[in-house]
Amino acid sequence: MTDTRTRLLTDLRRIEDDDYQLRPGEREADLVPALLAHLGDPAPELRDELVYPTFRAFITDGRLTEEELRTLLDTLIDGRHLFHGIGGLGDPSVFTRTFSMLVVALVLERHRRRPFLATDQFARVRDALLRYHGQEQDLRGLVDEGGWAHAAAHGADALDELVRCPEADPATCRAVLDALRGLLHNGATIFADEEDERIATVVDALIEESLLPAQEIAEWLGGLADCADQPGSRAQMVARTNTKNLLRSLHFRRPRTGPLAAAILAAEVRVNSFRAD
């Protein structure tokens, strides 16, 4: 373990013990470069338990200025963070990408509560999140060596914050639905670590906030179930199983009556091969 990393561990443990209050002469912004350098650290003790919670405290508690947050956001979506090693499969670079995504979600949540992003920066973030979802290949949940990667869940968290922002127009919401479809119908990975619940949160936000017409969401759900009509294959099974789990998650969140409830049930009937005819 390097001296720098050892020092960071010691400092972050002390900051955690002090309820994230810094000592006289310390500044939150001065810690950001070290936090970014270890955002994707392969050790969950540092990444999950110290770096991310420190970012969360600094961002949600208003301890970083709006200008500092704008700078941080531009860094998070660059090639060394959100797109670090993009396209790779089974290597530790996934942690940098997925934890960058989580911190992006924190910044967007702060912006949603009190907007501070210019229109062009919001557009850059939106485009980066959508591009990421089109390129991520490593959809592992809990990794034996390294802990939580959880690309689909972390990505859904960021998309949930994105659609709730005041700048999220219907075109953005439709693009997010396309990204979610890509996650569910990814061709290789059946989600086993409650990713369906995190994805359902995004769809639920679109419904609850009336960000798209209910009929359009019902049609999207029906379109997801079209995978049931495809020839049997591993990719078809992935799409069908992930879709079925999402529909069930939505069913237990939404009212049991009305057109959307009917659309959810009708789609579930199509993708559930164990139902009796």
Image (spheres, helix red, strand yellow):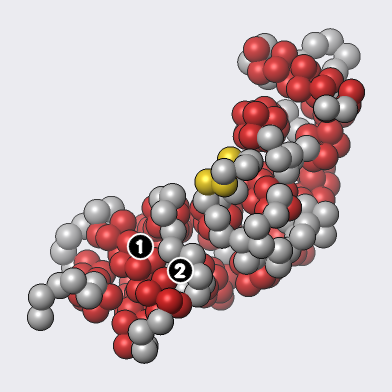
Residue at (35, 62) in percent of width and height: 246
Mark 2 lies on a secondary structure that is: helix
Residue at (50, 70) in percent of width and height: 188
How many residues crowd around disc 2 within 10 Å: few (fewer than 14), some, or many (20 or more)?
many
Q: Which residue is mark 2?
A: 184
Residue 215 image-quadrant placement: bottom left
Q: Label 2 amino acid?
A: Leu
Mark 1 lies on a secondary structure that is: helix
Q: Label 1 amino acid?
A: Leu
Q: Relative to 119, say whether 30 is above or below.
A: above
- Tell whether 176 sits left or right of 248: right
Residue with the most extreme front position: 144
How many residues crowd around disc 1 within 10 Å: few (fewer than 14), some, or many (20 or more)?
many
| Most foreground residue, 24 or 4 | 4
- Mark 1–mark 2 Cα distance, whole angstroms, equals 9 Å
Q: Position of residue 182 (x, y in %)?
A: 52, 73
- Tell whether 89 sits left or right of 272: right
Q: Which residue is mark 1?
A: 246
Q: Position of residue 234 (x, y in %)?
A: 43, 76
Residue at (44, 59) in percent of width and height: 191
Q: Relative to 123, say whether 232 is above or below.
A: below
Name the quadrant of the C terminus: bottom left
Name the quadrant of the N terminus: top right
Residue at (22, 75) in percent of width and height: 273
- Tell whether 213 sits left or right of 31: left
Tag 1 and tag 2, C-beta contact below 8 Å: yes
Residue 185 showing in the rendered view: yes
Question: Could you tell which of marks 1 and 2 lies nearer the N-terminus?
Answer: 2
Residue 205 image-quadrant placement: bottom left
